[in-house]
Amino acid sequence: MKLARALSDVEAKKVQTFILLGGVFTTLAIWTKLEDPINLPKMFVLVLSAAIVLGLALPALLRVHQVIGGSQRIAIGLVGLFLLGLLISTFATDVKYTAIFGEYHRNNGFLAYLAMVILMSTSALVFNLRSSGRYFTFFATTGLLITFYGFLQSAKLDPIDWVITYNPLITTLGNPNFTSGLLGLSGIVILYLALASKNQKFQAAYAVGLLANLFVLWRSGSIQGVFGFAIGATVILLVKFWLINKRYGQIGLALTVIAGTPVVLAIANIGPLANKLYQGTLKNRFDYWQAALAMFKDHPIFGVGIDRFGEYYRQYAVQNQVVQGQLTDNAHSIYMQILATGGLVAFVPYLLMIVFITIIGARALLSHNRNDKLAVSGVLGVWLATVFINIVTVDNLGVGVWFWITGGVLIAISSKQNALNVEGKNQLIAGQGYSGKKSASKSAKKSGQLTEFPIYQAFSAVLVLVSLILLVPTLSSSSNLKSIKEKKASFSSTEYSAEINLQAKANWGSAQNLLQLSVLAFQNSDLVSGDSILDRIFELDERSYYANYFRAFTLETVGKRSDAIKYREALLFLDPWNTTNQIELIRNYLAIGNRASAQQVAALIKGNYPGSQSDIDASALLVE
């Protein structure tokens, strides 16, 4: 039995199916029974899908150096290098739970990235130009399902009773920006299908679907998907025009440069289109990016910790933000997020991976024959659009999963080994080692017959079991947290405290969930339970902003201002621009007769915000 071998046609198609279904269901997954109904179920689906795919694709992964060309090996090597860098940063992160599972309601931790890396690497091994049609179909279907849900939300017919305080088009992604990004990318795929189809009925259906997609995209109110679609659509249309007539392509390219220049300038709030295209939220992102750069400057090698941006943001936020006191737990740029939280060990291979895949994708577009160029342009268009969108977005799992799948498909089709460019035939090889040779597996009785060894199915089952062991407790905790919040009225105060303590024991390793439970304890006036939970949070995350805040607040509430000082001093370090905290610290110093320290804090307020109400209040406290 050879453990390392090429996949048969049937095996390759099965792996493709699980990869694509993983993408579809990660995007669509929601579970309203959870306290986090959006991101946690997406991580669950994503990791399970990757576990299945890894087991089934393991034969090809074990001989990856034999079944793909040099540039593809380099690309997959860079993907692996990124994963290694991420793993190193994970070990260097102070709070391992966050590093592995990700920030509360984000879940962009090592586990999610590991799953997406698996999907990219295996996609690079099992796809080719012929099977890329399946990629387009699955992605387009996902976009149309999101479009349909968007119409329901727009018409106020949403079957789910979301609590939404802004644009209702959150779909299954939790935010209009993510909806915009997904629809922009899927719109590129639908456009490709409309142009590539030879059937007029299908062309008409795709055209209607594209119009619906773009309508919901526009109603989302977010412009990132619009720009993403424009980039991808431009790539496809230029290639289409070039294939029709080289002169048309040249004219189209010139018009793109002429028309695109003012649009690019408008993004930076420059030029005549700025008032129509520039979004004020970009100003907030500049604040986030400055903080990310400051974090990187102080932690250049390993970053501040995987998905730990939120706990460090207050410390590194600029003094005068666009929206004063604006908080965030993400840099709102995937590049800046990885740079700040993963440091150079993660950022450099991530950037090299993107640049290299882009280069081999562009080279494939130039080198493949006429019959293949449009398909290559479709994948490359989605890839380039995503690379652009990632500059200004959070790595939402429902959108981000397609970035990694698309990258894998682009790696796969960038090799001519995946296509016999024979005039009039264009026969594409699948499941034959991807090198033009038939599979050496002796267990195959005929070409394309299923030849997978049961051991790999068993390995997939083991990986799924391990994934369930890791993830089910997180789902259970989220479900219980939602339940306890909703059932407070049905408990007496004593019963509610007992339930809180029971859940705290079940979440003893998660500072994120313990913080939520401590809030419930304090709301129930159970200071003993609340303090006990805070003690555990400090053991897990000594720089937790809210743990320090709650401890200081509760101590001050019961008149123990002297005991609250060290927590207020910690907050002064964690949030140097917070004058509310500084005013309380002055009160605490004065309560123990430490006037010199109180004057130092008052001087700090005056230096930062001279003449402000906080400055006036601090001076008044010193006069009393």
Image (cartoon, rainbow, N blue to C red):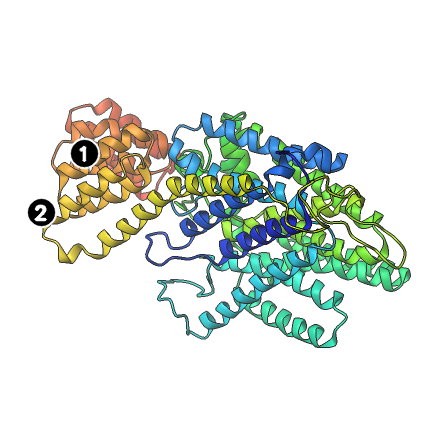
Residue drawn where x is 39% and y is 47% of the image: 105
In front here: 320 or 334? 334
In front here: 622 or 213? 213
- Against 380, residue 101 (above or below) is above
Task: Give the total of numbered labels.
Answer: 2
The quarter holding residue 489 reads bottom left
Residue ID for mark 2: 494
Residue drawn where x is 53% and y is 55% of the image: 280
Residue ID for mark 1: 532
Residue drawn where x is 42% and y is 63% of the image: 166
Residue 255: percent from the left, percent from the top?
80, 60
In front here: 196 or 533? 196
Q: Residues within 10 Å of mark 1 (few under 14, many from 20)?
A: some
* Residue type marked 2: Thr
Residue drawn where x is 80% and y is 55% of the image: 373
- Against 556, residue 324 (above or below) is below
* Residue type marked 1: Ser
